[in-house]
Image (cartoon, rainbow, N blue to C red):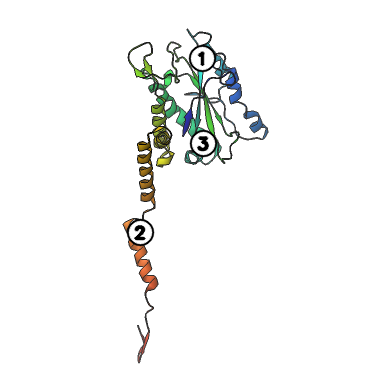
């Protein structure tokens, strides 16, 4: 599972002004799919589906109390399962889309709220999601992913929430709480596995990826040892299977039983 926070820019992800440009982008594949008679998904939040884009823009753009003109008004988040994870989420695009919304509502947003360490819950987060079914420059068979537009302010329009700050659960200074993105990645990964009964291999985990990218040489070597042990354990035959294989070998090499003729017939 890949979760990332696109940095603010002067284009689609410019978050100092209106959310209209990002909301427009979120709908860019809908027209083509509708022309082809293919299933599409509208915007959704914690409790509702098929929300109009105009409501999304209005709610995000009006929830900006006490923010300066140059302050971020919202943040974008991408949630992108692997092909293997998508197969665990359902057999059809519609099943996978419903599973994605469940995952966002029951795992991603609750963990996002808790990670600010301000006693927040999922109900305190103002967000809208939009599912995409294709991805440019990808050769994968399955490419479904989700774009989230998350307000900088909580539902009460009082608390400022930034997932891009570098403070981690601070209790002193101007910024209280903070946000630990690594912890969010771990918790949402574990939540996915529990929700869908997914058996995650070590090489698929955030722990493995982060260690091999950012860990020390010793940490990387230890991780590779764990990987080798896991792969060896997976291919090593169990004692029962070994015994069964030995019996089959003996049967294959045993000479055929000779038949002996007697006065009463054939004796084996």
Which residue has dot 3 on it?
96
Disc 2 and disc 1: Cα gap in Å? 61 Å
Answer whether labels 2 and 1 touch (C-beta < 8 Å): no
Q: Position of residue 187 (x, y in %)?
A: 39, 30
**Residue picked out by circle 2:** 241
* Image quarter of the C terminus: bottom left
In this view, the mark in front (3 or 2) = 2
Farthest bottom residue? 263
Residue, x 42% and y 22% (percent of image)? 122
Q: What residue is at 43 percent from the left and 34 percent from the top?
A: 213
Q: CA distance from mark 3 to mark 2?
A: 37 Å
Q: x, y (%) of residue 82?
A: 49, 38
Q: Is residue 137 visible?
A: yes
Classify residue 138 by image quadrant.
Answer: top right
For residue 73, which numbered disc appears in the image?
Answer: 1
Lateral position of residue 106 relative to residue 32, left or right = left
Looking at the rendered image, the disc whose residue lies closer to the viewer, 1 or 3, is 1
Element type at mark 2: helix
- Tell which of 12 and 258 is nearer to you: 12
Q: Element at badge 3?
A: helix
**Local secondary structure at mark 1:** loop
Between 19 and 34, the one nearer to me in the picture: 19
**Distance between the Cα atoms at labels 1 and 3?**
30 Å
Residue 3 vertical position relative to residue 170 in the rendered view, above or below: below
Residue 254 location in percent, x, y? Answer: 37, 74
């Amino acid at each position: 599972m890949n979760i990332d926070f696109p940095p603010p820019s002067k284009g689609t992800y410019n978050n100092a002004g209106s959310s209209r440009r990002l909301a427009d982008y979120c709908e860019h594949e809908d027209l083509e799919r509708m022309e082809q008679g293919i299933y599409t998904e509208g915007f959704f939040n914690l409790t509702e589906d098929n929300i109009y884009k105009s409501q999304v823009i209005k709610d995000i753009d009006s929830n900006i109390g006490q923010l300066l003109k140059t302050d971020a008004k919202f943040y974008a988040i991408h949630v992108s399962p692997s092909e293997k994870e998508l197969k665990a989420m359902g057999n059809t695009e519609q099943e996978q889309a419903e599973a994605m919304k469940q995952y966002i509502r029951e795992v991603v947003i609750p963990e996002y709220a808790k990670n600010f360490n301000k006693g927040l819950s999922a109900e305190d987060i103002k967000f809208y999601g939009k599912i995409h079914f294709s991805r440019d420059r990808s050769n994968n068979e399955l490419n479904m992913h989700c774009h989230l537009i998350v307000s900088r302010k909580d539902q009460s329009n009082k608390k400022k929430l930034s997932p891009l700050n570098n403070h981690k659960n601070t209790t002193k200074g101007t910024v209280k709480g903070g946000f630990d993105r690594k912890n969010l990645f771990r918790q949402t990964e574990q939540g996915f596995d529990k929700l869908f009964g997914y058996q995650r291999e070590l090489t698929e985990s955030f722990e493995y990826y982060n260690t091999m990218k950012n860990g020390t040489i010793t940490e990387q070597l230890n991780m590779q040892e764990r990987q080798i042990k896991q792969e060896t354990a997976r291919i090593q035959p169990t004692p029962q299977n070994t015994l069964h294989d030995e019996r089959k070998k003996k049967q294959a090499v045993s000479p055929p039983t000779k038949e002996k003729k007697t006065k009463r017939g054939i004796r084996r």
